[in-house]
Image (cartoon, helix red, strand yellow):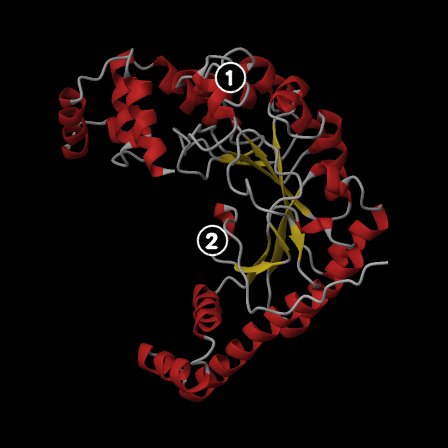
Amino acid sequence: MGIKKLQIYQGFEQGPIRPPSEASSLLLRVSRNCPWNRCTFCSVYKNEQFSLRPVDHVIEDIESVFEVTNVVLNELHEQGHLTQEIVNSLASTHFADKIPVFNIAVNWLARGEGSVFLQDANSLIIKPDDLIRILRHLNYRFPWITRITSYARSHTINRIAEEKLAALADAGLNRIHIGMESGCDEVLVKIDKGVTREHHISAGKAVKKAGIELSEYIMPGLGGSDLSIEHARQTADALNQIDADFIRLRTLAIPADIPLYEAYQVGEFKKCTDLQVISEIHELVSALSGITSRLASDHFYNLLQEVDGKLPGDKPRMLEILEHYMQLPADEQCLYQLGRRLGFFQSLQDLRPGVQRSGVEKIYERLEVTPDNIDRIVEQHMLKAI
């Protein structure tokens, strides 16, 4: 029988990513990397080994942040305000050997949202009782926390007993982010997601039943041009059965460091054009019915970020935006693609005459943009930005 190797605490840790909606959150690393790590559209954790952090190490991270916030808040109470000079003085006199965690804690306080995101890709894979211990300690040290959230795989959610999921909610887990990507089984197999449509539906329902907010991430374009319509329709049907709190759109990108890139290069995967993606999103939104989810397009890679609203009331407005783009003359569609991808345009309103449009038109002419080459031109730019 082997002797278990003791893991020594190496200090406060943070993982590489978090959802855009958690930009103001304290990032607390519960596990490292991704236990599945096979999805063909993802590069984040490839060649990295998954591991669980000892619960005591996570508790130590919480204590480190508490130590900083306690001193800073006491200083704020005494002084009535904090200047950069005071912050610098605290850093040098109290935390000279803990500058990274000092900066993290001060920035968290400064953002003022009081939210915490548990990293990395699937924190709910740890034993529920261990996670409950972490959640309770967070709330013990920071009773003013407003939200605690985490990524989770549908496969993992389905393995957690109903009463344990409810206990996690009771302990303070407010929101779970699930990467559904697609509700189409054929697409899920092609991207090696490791779950089925039914797994996604049952997991989503379980999260909602436990009283935890649910964000489902959908990836327009993931089925390629061959499966675009099926991807949209079946995903909408799955979402209609779940009624998530948030549906978040993340348009597919294909950088060279993801497994899907090779299939794209040899023609096995036919990438959707921007126009095809917009048509797919229109199909998806049209098919959403009987739910009260918030549809969010909160990612820079989405072409039409203004397609954002609460169902069912905002559905007509969102469809109108999509249809407006689809009905534009081809050269206007191309001009918007270029302006949006270069960061000049934020919405279709920016196509109106003015300095902004004139600047994009000059670039458009210089690059000799046409409907035939626009997707290649903007793809090259976007891959540099990823």
Q: Position of residue 268 (x, y in %)?
A: 51, 13
Give left or right: position of 274 versus 371. right
The residue sitting at 44% across, 29% down in the picture is 253
In screen coordinates, is 313 left or right of 358?
right
Name the kind of residue labelled 2 in the image.
Answer: Ala
Q: Is residue 311 left or right of residue 275?
A: right
Residue 320, x across and y down, in percent: 43, 22
Q: Amino acid at mark 1?
A: Gly
Report which residue position mark 1 lands on.
224
Whole-angstrom CA distance, mark 2 to mark 1, is 30 Å
The reply to whether residue 174 is visible in this rendering is no
Residue 14 place in picture, x, y as percent: 53, 59
Q: Nearer the viewer, residue 234 or 246?
A: 234
Kindly identify which residue carries mark 2. 23
Image height of 51 relative to 269, above or below: below
The quarter in which the C terminus is drawn is top left
